[in-house]
Amino acid sequence: MLPDFNRLRVFYYIYSSNSIVSAARTLHLSQPAVSQQLQKLEAEIEALLFIRLHKKLVPTEAAKRLFSLVQPFMDDLQEGMKNIRQPLDKPAGLLRIGAPREFGKEYLPLLSSSFRERYPEVSFTFSFHETAPLLAMLREGELDFTLVDVFMPKGQFLDTPHLFSVEQLVAEELVLACSAEYYRQQIDGNHSLAHLLSRRFISDDDDLMILRHWFHHHFKKSVAKLNVVMTTNSHEALISGIRLGMGLGLTSAHLVFDELNSGSIVPIETSKKNSKSWISLVQLQDKVPSLTEKTFLAHLKKVTQKTEMFKKFARFSTEDI
């Protein structure tokens, strides 16, 4: 049989505060009552949960295992009770949103702030990761929906496409670029394939797939080897490397929009227009979105299409997208 829930609740607060006194205060019970509930729980599950050592409680391995079972339920219950009290006829409660790190930190605070001006009872939790972790979190129910940076054709990035629906939102122009100083010293207007291949590169892609695609897109040539002097799993670090003159790096134009306009970062341009990646909305196919989710997604789509916030994406015309 399952342990008595009230005793598990007492155990949760004792473990969380590591104190019977604190648990008693939180639960509005006497200390003897809390101690008695703990003793009954230990007898019920036939395991010692705490060792009393110099007036301190030291949790046993059994206590650690029990807490790992009780904590998620108690935390979810507390959060769920907040949502139960939220109104049903207007957006309210918590939205859990995933996004690529650079895009998320730049735009999601602005989007959530403007949304909360109209719906102040909505709160947000943001998770910024690469595509694979975001999809895993969505699949496990840790996110309500996520934005991902999709370079390949629609749907091909998914291991299990039947689980997800994908909607393209914003096109990002991919530019191969370097600092103005590096351009002056190492490029000097020579954008030929042979010359570019002899230059230094920095990358945030271990297998250089996207860099190789840039060359194939612009020159119709497959590139076997590049002189990569820095590889990083942080696109922020890649942009820093570009600024510092470490070499040529591939980035989204909107992330260096001001520097491209000022000339401190210089794009490598050819006769062919640059290719694009997509910021795409990914949801679980079978999940019915809440009123809050649907309202925020309508706000997101309106903002991405019609406001000045996304003017940095528009280095090419709409018909090119």
Image: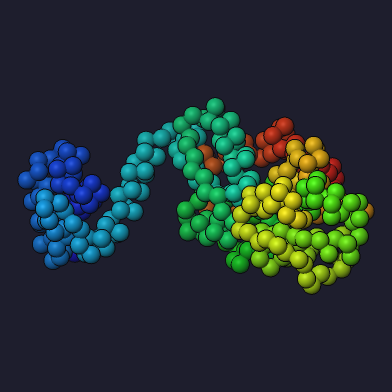
Q: Position of residue 62 (x, y in %)?
A: 21, 64
Task: Examine the image and state in which quarter residue 118 appears.
Answer: top right
Front-most of residues 138 and 174? 174
Residue 257 seen in the figure: yes
- The residue under the point 80% across, 37% down is 262
Q: Is residue 27 shown to the viewer in this render?
A: no
Task: Pick the quarter of the image with the N terminus.
Answer: bottom left
Q: Position of residue 128 (x, y in %)?
A: 55, 50
> Residue 220: x percent and y percent?
88, 66
Q: Residue furthest top?
A: 117
**Relative to residue 288, is residue 311 depicted above or below?**
above
Viewer-side residue, 47 vs 270:
270
Percent position (x, y) of residue 85? 37, 35
Residue drawn at (72%, 47%), measured in percent from left and top? 243
Q: Residue 133 vs residue 221: left or right?
A: left
- Residue drawn at x 81%, y 61% as measured from the top left: 199
Going by the image, does 201 lie left or right of 52? Answer: right
Numbered circles on residues, count = 0
Q: Colour scheme used in the picture?
A: rainbow
Residue at (89, 51) in percent of width and height: 188
Q: Residue furthest bottom?
A: 224
Direction from residue 21 to residue 163 in the image, left or right:
right
Q: Is residue 301 left or right of residue 261?
A: left
Along the line of sight, the residue nearer the viewer: 1 or 263? 263
Please tell me in which quadrant of the rendered image residue 67 appears.
Answer: bottom left
Query: Front-most of 85 and 168?
Result: 168
Q: Quadrant of residue 246?
A: bottom right
